[in-house]
Image (cartoon, helix red, strand yellow):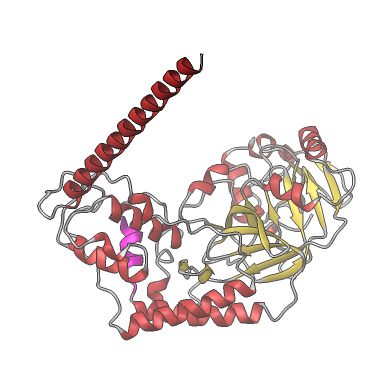
Amino acid sequence: MSRKLGIVDLSRRSLLRGAAAAGVAALAGQAAAQTAVDELINAKRRGNWDDQFDAQASRAATAIVTNTPILSQATLMNMQQAISQYQMIVANGGWPQVLPTVALRLGATDASVQALRQRLMIAGDLPQDAGMSNSYDSYVEGAVKRFQARHGLPEDGVLGEFTIKALNISADTRLNQLNINMARLQDQLTKPLEQRYLLVNIPAAALEVVENDQIALRNTAIVGSISRKSPLVSSKVSDIILNPYWTAPRSIVEKDIVPLMRKDPTYLTRNAIRLIDGNGNEVAPESIDWFAPKAPNLTFRQDPGKINAMSSTKINFPSPDAVYMHDTPTQGLFNKLMRFESSGCVRIQNVRDVVVWVLKNTPGWSRQEIERVIASRVNTPISVADEIGVHWVYITAWSPMGGVVQFRDDIYEQDGDAQLALQTNIGQEQVAGSVDEDFLPQ
């Protein structure tokens, strides 16, 4: 019996040794194969067969998203590092201009790609070991996407008009922009911040929802146009109004509504806008002479509902400019690159998420209850239980994390250099029915 067990043990040991030897041989074979592949990929004369695909291209697209808010001491310290970095870049001669002769996208070949590579390397978007060639490969595409993300541009990896213009802003101009915004940040941070606050950065057309010095939510916004700028604000949320009324200001009544009524007498009815006299009585639109020299001295008030100019929600706060934040029925505007379409007020994408966050400490207002009230179309004001700050700032350059510098267009031309206002001179479409900027307080 013991002899049989010895034979079995010996056979088992032999089998394991054989398996181990086979495993080592397999690993050696894999290593040799990988070495051969690496040698082929890294060969100087390999040609450009891999220019259009590189599984490691994601290295260039280093994550630049952080939960650090713009108004934070961490951002201030990162800004100081960024200024030192850009001072060194300027001292070393800056970066080259990128002047392509063909459309630059993945797979393109052009002499200007070398200048593009150099430009991206200097700013830290492209690894230094990515090489210098005329090929717009996946490394370059990843770096361009990173550059676009840092400049608030669509991350498509293609050198379009705005990407080329942003690339060709000189290093010393960017350094000056950093210094100007450093002063703005320092000024903002001399004031105490609430534990919870809503930050609208106007040049970025974006909202940061901040709690305990961390970004809880990010939301796309639409802010004031160049001719009707959104003001700087430092206030606190007073109340939320679900299903708000909209009262048309006199300027919109005279310039827009009256001419529309002359062309289409059903305009007010179709848009659920009622006429109210000084005694609170409703006046029939057909009883008004719309061709009279002056617009009727009546209140033009739009009922709550999906077509209401503020849609489901209005976020109120004290402001000398009578501005506020709100929802909008024209959601497609949030997909635009240039979101400078209002005359002061700020529209917020996914505003209901923000309202849930604002009301989370206000008893009785769960998400389910908020949605139920919105669905009812009943005008409902809600007093906010806790202190929620509101800050609208103008920051065109900031550094939320080390090695990452964010830049935005100086849309209101506050930075002292016309070339930083890339979008300012471009005509902006006015979307019919989308004006909300001059809204009177409810």
Describe residue 192's horizontal placement relative to residue 51 as left or right: right
Describe residue 157's horizontal placement relative to residue 211 as left or right: left
Report the magenta stretch's main SS: helix
**Residue nearest the observer in this picture, 126 or 195:** 126
Q: Is residue 161 magenta?
A: yes
State the image coordinates of residue 59 (x, y, percent, origin top left): 37, 54
**Residue nearest the observer in this picture, 112 or 369:** 112
Vertical relation: 9 (above or below) 309: above
**Residue nearest the observer in this picture, 374 or 62:** 62
Image quadrant containing the C terminus? bottom right
State the image coordinates of residue 42 (x, y, percent, origin top left): 19, 52
Q: Is residue 330 magenta?
A: no
Quadrant hosting residue 426: bottom left
Q: How many marks?
A: 0
Q: Residue at x 42, y 19 (%)?
A: 7
State the image coordinates of residue 393 (x, y, percent, origin top left): 62, 70
State the image coordinates of residue 138 (x, y, percent, origin top left): 28, 50
Q: Residue at x 90, y 47 (%)?
A: 363
- Looking at the image, can residue 436 be seen? no
- Looking at the image, can residue 215 be seen? yes
Q: Residue at x 37, y 50 (%)?
A: 58
**Residue nearest the observer in this picture, 322 or 265:** 322
Q: Where are the magenta residues, as a range? A: 160-169
Vertical relation: 24 (above or below) 134: above
Vertical relation: 99 (above or below) 79: above
Describe residue 87's horizontal placement relative to residue 351 as left or right: left
